[in-house]
Amino acid sequence: MKSSNNNSYCLKIYFHVIRRSNGTGGQSIESVNEAFNILNQDFNPHNISFNWDNQIDYIDNDSYYSSPTTAIFNVNNHQDGIDIYLYDDSSSAGGRANGVGQSSEFWVSGSYWKTPNNPLTRSHVISHEMGHVLYLWHTHHGTYNEGGNDNPCPELVNGSNSDTCGDYVTDTPADPHLQFDVNQSTCEWNSSGTDANGDTYNPDEKNVMSYTDVNCMEYFSEGQGERMRNAINTLPYLQQVVTDNCLVQKLSSIEQLCYDNSQTLSISDISNNSTTWQVSSNVTILSSNNSSIIVRATSSNSTGNGWVRAILSNGVSIQEDFEVGIPDRNKITIEHTTNTNGDYVLINNIWSILTSYHQDHNNFIGAEWDWKFEPVGGNMSILTRNDISNRIDVSVSGEGQLIIKTRVYNECGCSLWKDAAFQVKKSSTNPGGLFDGILNKGF
């Protein structure tokens, strides 16, 4: 299961809709189409697509309708495809695959229990359950004791055992179990915790295989994609569902959109479809046709997350997400060492390590950062060393207030300066010469 595999796979799927015995309730044709589109949207970036013949198997039975169970897996099941059983939005909420890497069926049912109570069948939960079929564990697997016959073990934050513990995927960070306790607006975990080494967990709240807020589920990692492709290539029950004739409609990829340089995005395999284009508020359409669109940032001040969405006449919706404009200053923090008093303090003539971070840190690994130091009153002598990307060492001689500023560059330019105010004190105010600053607090 560890060999590299970049092949493309087309998998046959069957949709079953559970209704009352009299034929009422259940999912509409439009809802099933939306579920199909979500699957392709989430899996296509990993060279996995799905073939569906647009037929729906209706299971009209009151005994199944309200209370999903694994008994449904025995109804009209197939060996040559993945069976997807969809319950009514009013049924008990949840999803269940028939094991992890063991069999090719799952069900999804009900609506999310948190406002705005999204139907789970039309959310990334359907991709979460498909992930189990394709041999993905939860990102908290092993770290949180959820059972399993694979001798699970906790994954460490430093990643040293990530290929043999946790979810066995090295590019998904250790996850202690988010328990859906994630801020729906910011998609940030509301809790905290440390591993066996005392290292602080920093889980990925947007990974589809986590127990994040349903509205924050967004993607699979590259490593998860490779694990799924390897599973398709090696597991007998998945080899049986491989087919062809998957029409994969993709939107070309971009990472950054600037104001000065427009970008063209094109749809592959447009066929005879007509296209409706939509963009986020910080993106402007310069021109478009059925198969492509030319866009740029709305203004030189535009920043943040942007997207372009193509809605095809066959019901397929595909979207490309990217960063817009210069880096957002409000997403930058300056960190120092910790102290319970909560002040930003530098000790006279003691070397201090300062590190700056951008909230979208993965986009700024190895990026160029600038630093500025501006004393406010008093005489200060400032020395720096180890100016390496987003980290710098500083030693200050003198007393008073010091404004420390940082900014970061991307291909659109540099961010505005981010400020943090530090007090410089004599070492006598801090016996032992320890730092008196704080960690994880930025202005």
Image (cartoon, rainbow, N blue to C red):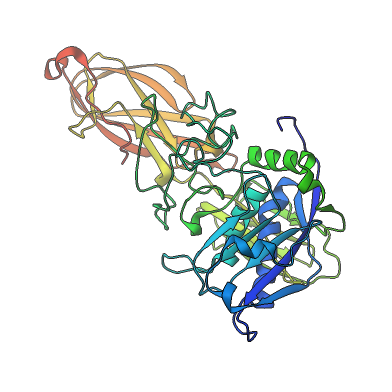
Identify which residue is drawn at 54% across, 37% down.
362
To which quarter of the image does residue 411 belong? top right
Farthest residue to the bottom: give it: 22
376 sits to left or right of 217: left
Quick one: 27 or 358, which is closer to the camera? 27
431 sits to left or right of 381: left
**Quarter in which the N terminus is drawn:** top right
Q: Is residue 93 above or below residue 105?
A: below
* x and y percentages locating residue 99 in the rendered image: 62, 49
Identify which residue is drawn at 50% across, 53% down.
301
Identify which residue is drawn at 41% across, 48% down.
188
Farthest residue to the left: give it: 429
* x and y percentages locating residue 94 in the rendered image: 52, 61
411 sits to left or right of 314: left
* x and y percentages locating residue 98 in the rendered image: 63, 53
**Quarter in which the C terminus is drawn:** top left
Q: Is residue 14 above or below residue 257?
A: below
* x and y percentages locating residue 207 in the rendered image: 54, 47
To which quarter of the image does residue 413 belong? top right
- Is residue 167 visible to us here? yes
